[in-house]
Structure formats: structure tokens, C-alpha cells
Amino acid sequence: MLLQYIQTALESAHYEMIDDEEPFYGEVPALAGVWATGKTLEECHRNLAEAIEDWVLFSVAKGLPIPPLGQVTIRLPEKAPV
């Protein structure tokens, strides 16, 4: 489920070149604040995948809503078993 969510997010990512030491910039418009940079497009893509994963895990840990991406949703149980 997490991998499918990350893949779907990456498919909707927007990339551009910026004037910086790491000229490649990528973001996922549907996930506010999720962005990454890299020296190459591949590095930016990898960094963006890590940023998405971190964002999802942080959202889960804090109980924040995770928006669906297309047909992909992350559903959390009401209460975790002890």
C-alpha cells in the first residue's frame, strides 16, 4: 500500500530546473509541502520518493489526514491492536 502510494505520487510529480547548487527541483502538488532537489533528475526523483515516504510516516504518527491519490488510499485502523 505504501509503495503504491509513493509510486502514484511520483507519477503526478512536477519537475523543473532552478538556479541552485542542486538544479533539479521536484514536488507533488497534491501533497502540500512535499518537495526535493538533486544534482541530477534521477537524484531528485529518489529524494522526492524519500520525502513522500517521510511525509506519509509523519502524517501517520501524528494522526494527520492522508489524501487519496487517484484510486490509491492509505487507510489506518481506528485503533492499533495492543
Image: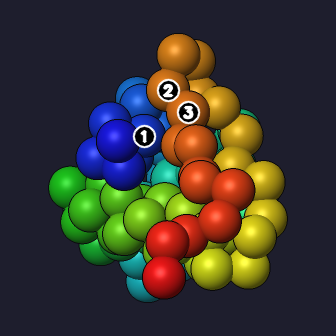
22 to 27, vertically: above or below: below
User: Tag 1 or tag 3, which sits nearer the N-term?
Assistant: 1
User: Tag 1 or tag 2, which sits nearer the N-term?
Assistant: 1
Q: Are marks 2 and 3 in contact (CB under 8 Å)?
A: yes
Residue topped by disc 2? 72
**67 and 27: which is toward the camera:** 67
Residue 66, image x, y percentages:
69, 50
Residue topped by disc 1? 5
The amino acid marked with disc number 2 is Val
The amino acid marked with disc number 1 is Tyr
The CA span between labels 2 and 3 is 4 Å
**40 and 61: which is toward the camera:** 61
**57 and 42: which is toward the camera:** 57
Which mark, residue 62?
Answer: none
Q: The residue tagged with tag 1: helix, strand or loop?
A: helix
**7 and 56: which is toward the camera:** 56
The amino acid marked with disc number 3 is Thr
Residue 3, image x, y percentages:
29, 47
| Left or right of 4 on screen, residue 15 | right
Q: Residue furthest front?
A: 82
Q: Is residue 41 visible?
A: no
| Left or right of 74 on screen, residue 4 | left
Going 26% across and 62% down the picture, which residue do you hit?
46
Q: Which label sits in the foreground, 3 or 1?
A: 3
Q: Are marks 3 and 1 in contact (CB under 8 Å)?
A: yes
Going 55% across and 70% down the picture, which residue do you hit?
80
* Label 3 neighbour load within 10 Å: few <14, some 14-19, many 20+: some
Residue topped by disc 3? 73
Q: The residue tagged with tag 3: helix, strand or loop?
A: loop
Q: Are marks 2 and 1 in contact (CB under 8 Å)?
A: yes
* Label 2 neighbour load within 10 Å: few <14, some 14-19, many 20+: some
